[in-house]
Image (cartoon, grey):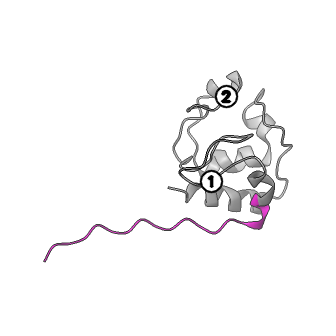
Amino acid sequence: MAMSAPLAAAPMAKPPAFAVCAACHATTPDARKGIGPNLYGISGRKAGAGSFAYSPAMKSSGIAWDREKLTAFIINPRTVVPGNKMPFAGQKNPKAAAEIADYLISLK
């Protein structure tokens, strides 16, 4: 009997705090970029990679997105990538920021 490949884990449900992010960011594989880049598949992606018009600061940040970096960026984008062009002051609730990061990491 042949063994089948394990099924990929389903993405997490969008946390309520993601509503602010959703105004600019798509999260499905075939969605077009909008005001901000599509965040589908961001886990492990190099910051500033892709066809979106990223700031020079984002492109040269050297970041590969993981839970820790995403959470920190969501809390304070200007500190994590000084000079980035995202007009968002940050999610000041660390728990909500971590929930958003966990959701984004689940999008594979």
User: Is 11 drawn above or below residue 62 in the view shown?
Assistant: below
Q: Residue at x 69, y 51 (%)?
A: 71
Q: Horizontal and vertical percent for residue 33?
A: 65, 41
Q: Horizontal and vertical percent for residue 5?
A: 28, 67
User: Is 9 drawn above or below residue 34 in the view shown?
Assistant: below
Q: Given the current orientation, which residue lies at the most extreme bottom position?
A: 1
Identify the secondary structure beneath mark 1: loop
Amino acid type of disc 1? Thr
User: What are the residue bounds of the magenta stretch?
Assistant: 1-18
> Quick check: is 16 in the magenta stretch?
yes
Give the left or right position of residue 10, taking residue 2 as reference. Answer: right
From mark 2 to mark 1, how far is it between C-alphas?
17 Å
Amino acid type of disc 2? Ala
Q: Which residue is mark 1?
A: 27
Q: Horizontal and vertical percent for residue 47?
A: 60, 35
Question: Which of the marked residues, 2 or 1, is nearer the chain's N terminus?
Answer: 1
What label does residue 53 carry, if any?
2
What label does residue 92 carry, if any?
none
Q: Residue at x 70, y 42 (%)?
A: 34
Q: Horizontal and vertical percent for residue 87?
A: 84, 38
Q: Quadrant of residue 15?
A: bottom right
User: Is 29 drawn above or below residue 13 in the view shown?
Assistant: above
